[in-house]
Amino acid sequence: MATLDVRNLSVCYLTDEGVALNAADDVSFQVDQGKSLGIVGESGCGKTTVMLALLRLLPEAGRIMEGQVFLEGKDLLQCSEGEMRNLRWSKISIVFQGAMNALNPVRTIESQIVEVLKIHGVEGQSQRARVRAGELLELVGIPPERGRQYPHQYSGGMRQRAMIAMALACNPRVLIADEPTTALDVMIQAQILNLLRKLQKSLNLALIIVTHDLGVVAEICDDVLVMYSGTVVETGSGDAIFNHPRHPYTERLLQAFPDIESPNADLVSIPGNPPRLDELPPGCRFAPRCHIAEERCHIEVPKPIEIEHRHWCACHLYPGRRE
Amino acid sequence: MEAPILQVQSLRKYFPCQRSMADRLFHRRRKFVHAVDDVSFTINRGEILALVGESGSGKTTIGMNVLGLQEPTGGRILFDGYDVTRWARGDLESVNSDDVAAKKRRQQILELRRRAQIIFQDPYESLNPRQKVFETIVEPLEIHRIGRSAEEKRERVRKALEESGLAPAEHFWDRYPDRLSGGQRQRLVIAAALVLEPELLVADEPVSMLDVSIRAEILSLLNELREERNITILYTTHDLATAGIFTDRMAVMYLGRIVELGPTQAVLSEPRHPYTRALVSVVPAPNPRRRRKQVVLEGEVPNPIDLPSGCRFHPRCPQAQDECSQIDPQLVPVSEDHQVACLHA
């Protein structure tokens, strides 16, 4: 049984006029203990929406239309709000995008971690909570004595480390990192990715990395899920996705990614823009931008097909399209 | 051979730090942020130079000084032979319009500014949300008094838009920026620079805010401009991968200095400076089979106020030796057009 098992999750946002905009459609994936999954897609493709939905943290306009989210066998979508509050942070935690800028500027890093420990009842006693906070900082590579400093005394990379420490405060089974390295310099990005990789192994975490950066995924993820306009277009192992991509969107996305080892390869761009949620095409959502789309692509929504073991692709042109 | 269009000679730019009350009481000397400290390079007409470095390395400051948006602390910048170091001081508004010499000087500065333009990083913030596309592009023409008739201005705006890939122009020019996608906004920013027919473009991280699938479009557009119009581009970025694609030469910066300068392919395939080597090693390859042996540097770039002695990189350098903390290495040639500032390169 997978630690986190998301099945057929669909999410809508209601507009003021009462129109439901489909932001995520029929999304399914699993993550096991000690494994990592990368969710890639461009801005607006619904990757953050899916994460918020499974944590039941959607903004007011968001509605989960259908689906199940099993965390160690328990369906999160059936839990009461109280149960959910206990599970968040203690079983499943998230480092939000840009969270490093959300630290309270007038309180020390240590006191902010202590607060998490107390609220979740991990350590009630202040002295012990402070010791634990120090251990957590050490775990993410920050000298414990720097816990007495304020966020402005930390660099961006250190604040991100502090956020990761906070997310790990209650020993969660699943850690979600939403764009963990966006806005960080390349060297700091490498440090943070190494840290996440190390923590995933040593704490046996089920790790989900949400990012627009294929390079980040290639560096640390075992499995990859590619999203486009709210739908999953392809999932598989990192090796399968990067070396045998099947969906035309994945193919193009890889060709659009610059590689310093083959600088002369032509960079491809994908003409056009992703569809607006209120103007979704009736068939495959990628069809209007697809270079090999056929007539039925514009009419019929493609179903995901398992083209190889654990490699799924939602494209009409499979099976039958040659490599 | 034609002289380089841009020559930067020993450029220095220091920013004064605020002094605290205690500093004043004890007459402590004011400290300075050494944003750019003795940087020299040249760019030939029609060439694209990548200025690569982490945040705080001084790359944006160089771009600002080249355009005369800041006044250098020292050194010279020659743009097509003119010393533009004093651009920033030539306050256009305060010039007394009766003075013929001042008027002429003003004309000269305006003309130089027209010839060197900038593309900013964030197309979501660099456009006025209350200006329509047409107004955004016609404004530079009005400032520079280009185009005699409304008709002529219109034609110039159309040309700039279409060359930047916003065609047909009629389709776009009555829109506000919020009706444009990120890629289209950046094209609009490029059009606003192009309408003045500049010879030098400073592109400051022009694609870092854009999605991967549209980055290539913008980069190819810049490359086309170079090929068709022979525009010179100074491309500043922290992203070695995009810098590797279409630039001719690359200058790698660390703490206000150029540590390595050479043809892009040589720098990327055979980096000589230990910092460049580390940077190249951590660029993610888009393939899990090719995960490289990384040289991840510990810690972070030190602050540019109290600089390390000797080589600025020595506290983090995996190959540092004793003399590195004493001798400040200068850029020296390691091959014909490849220079490195390292004692052990």
Image (cartoon, coloured by chain):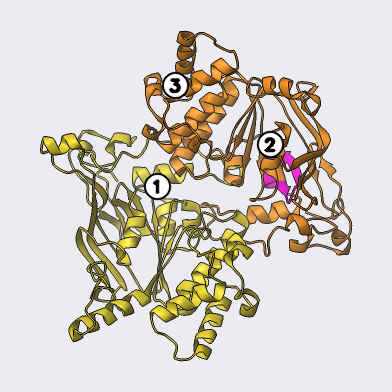
Chain colours: A orange, B yellow
Q: Which mark is residue A52?
A: 2
| The N terminus of chain A lies in quadrant | top right
Image height of B312 relative to B253, above or below:
above
Is label 2 in contact with label 3 (beta carbons under 8 Å)?
A: no
Is label 2 in contact with label 1 (beta carbons under 8 Å)?
A: no
Mark 1 = which residue?
B54
Specify whether residue A239 is painted magenta.
yes
Image height of A279 relative to A245, above or below:
below
Residue at image location 59% in from the left, 62% down from the top: B183
The amino acid pointed to by label 1 is Glu
Q: Is residue B145 visible?
A: yes
Within the image, what quadrant is residue A211 found in?
A: top right
Within the image, what quadrant is residue B309 found in?
A: top left
Sequence-wise first label, 2 or 3: 2
Residue positioned most to the left? B27
Distance between mark 2 and mark 3 Cα atoms: 27 Å
Q: Mark 2 falls on what kind of element?
A: helix
Mark 3 = which residue?
A110
Q: Which mark is residue B29?
A: none
The amino acid pointed to by label 2 is Leu
Q: Which of label 2 and label 1 is nearer to you?
A: 2
Specify whether residue A212 is painted magenta.
no
Region in magenta: A227-243
Distance between mark 3 and mark 1 Cα atoms: 29 Å
Image height of B219 relative to A205, above or below:
below
Q: Which of label 3 and label 1 is nearer to you?
A: 3
The amino acid pointed to by label 3 is Glu
Distance between mark 2 and mark 1 Cα atoms: 32 Å
Within the image, what quadrant is residue A291 found in?
A: bottom right
Q: Mark 3 falls on what kind of element?
A: helix
